[in-house]
Image (cartoon, rainbow, N blue to C red):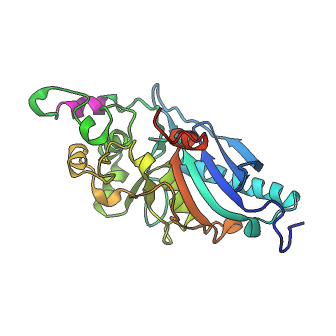
Amino acid sequence: MASGGTKKFGDLVGSIDEGTSSARFLLFRAETAEVVCFHQKELRLICPQEGWVEQDPNEILSVVYECIERTLEKLIELGGNPQHDIVAIGVTNQRETTIVWDRTTGEPLYNAIVWQDMRTSSTVDQLLETVPNKTKNKNYLKPLCGLPLSPYFSAVKLRWLIDNVPKVKSAIRSGNCLFGTVDTWLIWNLTGGSDGGAHVTDVSNASRTMLMNIETLKYDKALMKFFDVPVEILPEIRSSSEVYGLIKFKPLQHIPLAGCLGDQQSALVGQECLTRG
């Protein structure tokens, strides 16, 4: 049975951990970081051709929802009360994986292109041709975004989607396209989706797109021009610790979604590696 007025576990913090091979939802005691309960489920990888790696964005979402529901059932079995005990939820995610969807229907315009996908090697070659003085210098953008030009990063995947998927180009033209990494896709859906969902990302995920200036922590006009990406489709860059919105997904309704970090950065923070070296 759910508990009444007193909190059996103290304040609990929930973590949505959406990785490449599985997703899980964990509940921690806020005071001690002790895990109270969790549920984990594997995710499918789709490989249409050699070197191509995709996932179904709707499947990612439904697996995350299922992990939340199963974890809350375990909490209730332990005598907890989700609405009473959980004070905030955070998201950590596989980085660089790229999703585009329709802002009106909420439907993905293509499968998620996963971070290790190599189809964009030819896109990188095309972009290198546009580097001034024909130097083909892969580090040409590094002073701005801190990253070398590589198939790995989200801007290159987004460029491929715009060039190769007519639905994406059409949605951009009609003002209906939204882009995001997995954190953005989850936060947008959890906070309402097409009904007012927050279209946001955090600096740690934005830093892996090649579109954010690492000095200003804002999208850089020179980078957006280089990749020919319209700013209108990009999520707002926010800090890693703030309230992005209240969750509208029934079992966690009205609980603040209040943290977001890419998986490698969140591992550093979790181990309290907060000073250089």
Which residue is drawn at the image coordinates 16% and 35% (left, top)? Answer: 130
Q: Where is residue 243 in the image (x, y as percent from the top left)?
A: 53, 65
Looking at the image, is 235 positioned above or below residue 271?
below
- Magenta stretch? 122-129
- Magenta: main secondary structure: helix
Between 18 and 179, the residue placed more toward the observer is: 18
- Residue placed furthest toward the bottom: 5
Report whether residue 146 is seen: yes
| Place of residue 127 in the rendered image (x, y in percent of width and height, measured from the top left) | 23, 34
| 96 in relation to 198, above or below | above
Q: Is residue 64 left or right of residue 236?
A: right
- Number of callouts: 0
Task: Give coordinates of residue 30: x percent, y percent.
Answer: 70, 56
- Residue 258 image position (x, y, % from top left): 56, 61
Q: In which quarter of the image is the N terminus?
A: bottom right
Q: Which of 223 and 30 is in front in this view?
A: 30
- 186 and 269: which is toward the camera: 269
Q: Which residue lies furthest to the left in this view?
A: 133
Residue 37 in view in this figure? no
Residue 93 belongs to magenta span: no
- Left or right of 172? Residue 16 is right
Question: Would you say 105 lies left or right of 37 here?
Answer: left
Residue 131, above or below 190: above
Residue at 32 percent across and 45 percent down: it is 214
* Side of 45 relative to 82 (left or right): left
Q: Is residue 7 or residue 204 the one in the foreground? A: 7
- Is 13 placed above or below 128 here? below
Quadrant housing residue 218: bottom left
